[in-house]
């Protein structure tokens, strides 16, 4: 298992089905934009950020233009599974990551331009802050425009955020040591339920968790960019040629 490199601060983890090339290209571009914004606003060296994309059982389409920090992995799908909901891909990429902190970006979501700059002062100023929770724009998918919802007056804001239906992996910046060592990686807890159950475990094992008001991602930003899916089109073309 690779150890976190002191030179790489952030690893962005992206599981991909491999059939949403436009959405994936948009997700990759959002990481590049966030790196450039953090360079200009906070002095972050772009060499301290890497982006890992793992394809789920297929050698998916890759963006025509990709930065040197982007690495692709083709990971086998579990026998008999049509989709692993990204769980085994996320786990494998967490273990392959070299950064001290992880961001979890699915291929149909995007980071906001300010995402890395928003997380940076917290992870640099407080080494014990191993779980930072930002807000995510969910207006494209849900009636609730942002998650987590505002905490009630007097409530523990972090504990309130870590509730079923109130948090998404896109909200998180977490220490790799918390995720991979204390948190045992990203466990397959049964489909979509895995998101909350893994986040809850990280929260319980975090040394220090904090919540920020900045919006760090847009959920479902890639919706409609690949309406049919590349694999479906390829399958039809093969059938037509048979």
Image (spheres, rainbow, N blue to C red):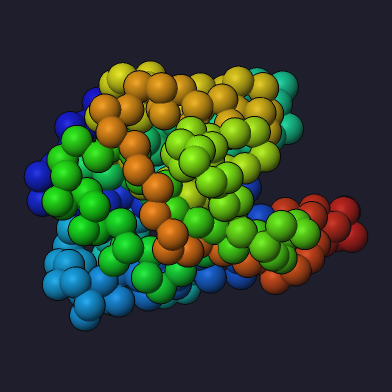
State the residue in front, 187 or 63: 187
Above-or-below relation of 174 to 107: above
State the residue in front, 201 or 229: 201
Q: Is residue 90 visible?
A: no
Above-or-below relation of 236 to 157: below
Q: Is residue 78 left or right of residue 209?
A: right
Q: Residue at x 19, y 35 (%)?
A: 128
Among the 4 quarters of the image, the one containing residue 233: bottom right
Q: Residue at x 63, y 66 (%)?
A: 221
State the residue in front, 231 or 54: 54
Q: Is residue 47 left or right of residue 134?
A: left
Q: Residue at x 50, y 56 (%)?
A: 135
Image coordinates for residue 242, horizontal then vertical, percent = 87, 53
Image coordinates for residue 22, horizontal then vertical, percent = 61, 69
Among the 4 quarters of the image, the one containing residue 132: top left
State the residue in front, 222 or 179: 179
Above-or-below relation of 28 to 1: below
Image coordinates for residue 133, horizontal then vertical, percent = 42, 47
Residue ranking furthest to the front: 154
Image coordinates for residue 182, horizontal then vertical, percent = 31, 20
Q: Is residue 20 left or right of residue 124?
A: right
């Amino acid at each position: 298992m690779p150890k976190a490199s002191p030179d790489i601060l952030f690893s962005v983890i992206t599981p991909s089905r491999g059939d949403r090339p436009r959405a994936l290209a948009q997700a990759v571009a959002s990481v590049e934009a966030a790196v450039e914004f953090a360079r200009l606003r906070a002095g972050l060296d772009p060499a301290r950020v890497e982006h890992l994309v793992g394809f789920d059982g297929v050698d998916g389409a890759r963006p025509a233009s990709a930065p040197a920090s982007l690495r692709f992995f083709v990971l086998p799908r579990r026998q008999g599974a049509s989709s692993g909901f990204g769980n085994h891909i996320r786990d494998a990429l967490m273990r392959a990551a070299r950064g001290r902190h992880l961001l979890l970006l699915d291929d149909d979501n995007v980071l906001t331009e300010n995402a890395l700059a928003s997380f940076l002062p917290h992870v640099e100023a407080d080494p014990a802050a191993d779980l930072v929770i930002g807000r995510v724009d969910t207006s494209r998918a849900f009636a609730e425009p942002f998650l987590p919802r505002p905490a009630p007056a007097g409530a523990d804001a972090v504990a309130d955020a870590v509730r079923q239906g109130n948090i998404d992996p896109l909200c998180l910046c977490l220490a790799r040591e918390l995720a991979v060592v204390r948190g045992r990686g990203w466990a397959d807890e049964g489909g979509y339920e895995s998101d909350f159950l893994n986040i809850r475990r990280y929260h319980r094992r975090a040394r220090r968790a904090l919540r920020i008001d900045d919006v760090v991602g847009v959920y479902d930003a890639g919706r409609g960019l690949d309406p049919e899916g590349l694999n479906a089109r390829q399958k039809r073309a093969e059938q037509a040629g048979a």
